[in-house]
Image (cartoon, helix red, strand yellow):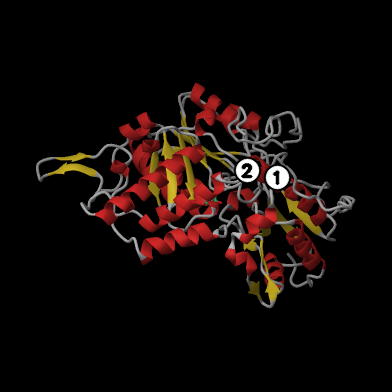
Amino acid sequence: MTTPDGSGRGSGAHGLAGRPPSASGRTGTRLYWVPAAASPSTAAAPAMPSAPVVPTGGFDVEAVRREFPQLHREVNGHPLVWLDNGATTLKPRQVVEAVGEHYATSTSNVHRGAHTLARQATRIYEEGRAEAAELLGTPDPDEVVFVRGTTEAVNLVAQSWGRANLGVGDEILVSAAEHHSNLVPWQLIAKEKRARVVPVPLLPDGQLDQDAYRDLLSHRTKLVALTHASNVLGTVPPVAEMTALAHRYGARVLVDGAQAVSHFPVDVKALDADFYAFSGHKVFAPTGIGVLYGKRDLLEAMPPWQGGGNMIDSVSFDETTYAPVPHRLEAGTGHIAGVAGLRAALRYLSGLDRQAATAHEEQLTAYATAALATVPGLRLIGDAPGKIGVLTFLLAGVDPMAVAAQLDQQGIAVRAGHHCAQPALAAYGLQSAVRASLALYNTVQDVDSLVGALQGVQATTAA
Ligand code: PMP
């Protein structure tokens, strides 16, 4: 399912109609707005749905779970309940086998051998690139650059495109919801080029303030750095609309898809994103492999950012010329086993009914939101319409790390801390919170386990 905003999610959810019109608490152009009275801890708790929300539309979550070996282990004497998908996803059997096979029987380097195994590894490597292109909705696999992950993708664009295109007084708009990996690389290059990083503020429910965004855009804007799904608030901004606005000023847009690709179909062409980044490990593939998508003309105009093998055409002491994209931006031996695993993960994903998987996650998110609201003293952070299944919360009187530790004793894995998004938490006056994050293999029972365990969490230090 591809929608006009390219998110593959229901239309209207990310538009502006639902935002509070005048409650933004403006102070200059910074509109950080902290929710007050309406937090779930003080509001009347919605009743837990009386009947479990059973996934519909042909999505067989039990069949999916059978493919993920780690879901069938115990931790601390309890069946594992994996609710740390925002940090990393579990791997299906197909991925484990693909990586194992590469190392057990099919090890070879790529692109440079004249033997059978080199050809085989090269075929798998380039099929992995084609799978990534298909996942993102580009017909051109050369627009896919292999990197270590989202972090490296953003650093590549900052160091290559940024160094070539940013100058004194230029502005980089960065949403306040960004992960540090889509903020710090811009701060580094901005410092070097004497450009400015300007935050796009949040509304109380976790949406980006579109009025402020429009006000901030100008001909000084050279780049907009934008998440496709926030890892701490779950917000899915209206990326297509925001990109179209940025393009009116000639600015480029880099979209961080780290939390998006596993949750809903993505179409970079419909988004008209200039750059799009994701990490394999957040979409059921191995760690250490990720993708930078870039429009071909942009990639071709970008200077190499790392030099070495694979990225050259010819080398001499007098003159070195470079290979065409994407290889020009891929110096050195890549993560070949990682690409084999990524290829397997994306094939696995495309074999699922993505629309049904997204619907399953949306229903589970709604269920979990209502269920968490029944826990006394629980305050949920971020309730933007259409958010993904990222449930960040505080429990009154309990330190977030203590909440996570007590859940861990019952085999429930969540994350606690700043989630590498300190500005987003700071917008709510927070430094730390607990995060339960859902994936397509999670169930109503997982949510019930979490809620049941939270009811019994013992007070420790004040949160
Ligand atoms: N962006 C977002 C939204 C993320 O959630 C993460 C990982 N938590 C990253 C970027 C960074 O990904 P990686 O560490 O795989 O480079």
Residue visible at 31% across and 45% down in the picture: 305
Pointer 1 residue: 58
Q: Circle 1 — which element?
A: loop
Q: Up-down: is 120 above or below 449?
A: above
Residue 386 position within the rendered picture, expressed as x and y whole percent measured from the top left: 70, 39
> CB atoms at circles 1 and 2 under 8 Å apart?
yes
| Mark closest to the chain's N terminus, 1 or 2 | 1
Residue 195 shows in the view: yes
Number of residue marks: 2
Q: Quadrant of the N terminus?
A: top right
Position of the C terminus by quadrant: bottom right
In-image side of 387 versus 258 (left or right): right
Q: Badge 1: few (under 14), some or many (20 or more) residues near its Cα, within 10 Å?
A: few
Q: Which residue is mark 2?
A: 353
Could you say which quadrant of the image residue 31 lies in?
Answer: top right
Quick check: can you spot residue 188? Answer: no
Q: Which one is in front, 287 or 404?
A: 287
Q: Position of residue 235 (x, y in %)?
A: 65, 43
Q: Is residue 430 left or right of residue 366?
A: left
* Residue 227 place in picture, x, y as percent: 56, 42
The image shows residue 96 at horizontal and vertical percentages of 49, 62
Amino acid on which the number 1 mark rests in the picture: Gly
Q: Residue at x 41, y 36 (%)?
A: 294
User: What number is the disc on residue 332?
Assistant: none
Q: Nearer the viewer, residue 135 or 105?
A: 105
From the viewer's perspective, is residue 11 above or below residue 394? above
Which amino acid lies under the numbered mark 2 shown in the image of this protein?
Asp
